[in-house]
Amino acid sequence: MSKKDKTPGRGKWALIYTGAFILSFAASAIFKMTYDPTHGKYKADWSDSVGTVYTDISYGKGAANKFDLYVPADNSKESYGLVVYLHAGGFATGDKADDKEMLQWLCSLGYVSAGINYTLFNDDHPDASVYSQSMEIKEAMPYVVDEAKKLGYNVDRMAVSGGSAGGCLALIYGLRDADTSPVPVKMIFEAVGPAAFYHEDWTNYGLDQNSEAAAGLFTTMAGTEITVDMIENHSYTEQVRPISADMWVNENSVPIVCAYGEQDKICPFASSTRLVEQLEKYNIPHDYYILPHSGHGLQNDSKLSAQYMDKVTEYLDKYMR
């Protein structure tokens, strides 16, 4: 297939995918303003007595290559844990500032916390992909650790986390890139992040029935060409492996706590079951929350949403202290 032939298809299906995630993010942003199943349990009363935030620290040459760093007011400890939280937005929108409350709460627990921006897929950056974003996150980590140390916080362990697109990127870093991390990765927590890329799972986009759509969408996400023939003969595994977290699970993988909505129309629920199958295969400690009545916002199972956050704090206490 020539470049001329494949570009229109890729653009068509990439726009469908991106549009769905943008709509999802917009709805989630409104929802977050009014919904809190924990009734403020996981929010910090932020002030200088809790911590300080340093914004827009550069880690690369790109305009989006910036991170925010939250450091606790108590700087007397010999070492600190770092928790990185990656923002949502369907890989096409969103910003680290959207997770300010989460980062403040993590900092209030005594962790150094960081939100990292990455180059989004849009008209200005049509070649951005899940893969290129994952590589930017990997590039950013040494800068985050070094900046914390410059400020007097000796970071010697870390957790990586996020929601939706950020959850996907957190899984990729925590499973694919943990062995190159500047400090040991101890755990992952995430919600509704695509964890596997098999076209038959992406029924909410009709990719199981449309090979052209699957090839176009997965080409955009993987950042490398995937043809219709590769979809139809299932030979594209190596092309999507760099962005498929489930393929990186092994006996040395870190503990994971995750939550998924069984009615999710944005992130294929089946991608989470593939991840969990691998975690079980290798006996990796994990807690997997299925919210049976919820979609991408995890909004219809309040008790389970709260239990997920309770379990996150348990994991932080167990693996990050």
Image (cartoon, rainbow, N blue to C red):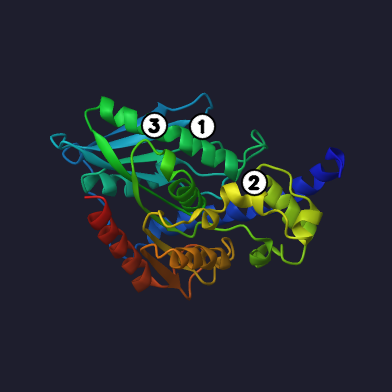
* Structural crowding at the residue carrying mark 1, measured as other residues with C-alpha within 10 Å and reported as few (<14), some (14–19) or many (≥20): some
Say what secondary structure mark 1 lies in.
loop
Give the SS element for disc 2.
helix
Q: With 20 as the anchor, is 154 left or right in this view?
A: left
Q: Earlier in the sequence, mark 1 or mark 3?
A: 1
Disc on the earlier residue, 3 or 2: 3
Per the image, the residue denoted by label 2 is 222
Q: Quadrant of residue 144?
A: top left
Q: Position of residue 107 (x, y in %)?
A: 25, 44
Q: Which mark is residue 64?
A: 1
Q: Inspect the image, locate mark 2, and give the three-letter code of the amino acid beneath it.
A: Ala
Looking at the rendered structure, the kind of residue marked 3 is Pro
Q: Count the marks.
A: 3
The relative height of residue 241 versus residue 72 in the rendered view (above or below) is: below
Quickly name the residue at label 3: 142
Q: What is the spatial separation of the Cα atoms under label 3 and label 2, in whole angstroms?
A: 24 Å
Q: Looking at the image, which residue is at 55% across and 57% down?
A: 24
Mark 1 belongs to which amino acid? Ala
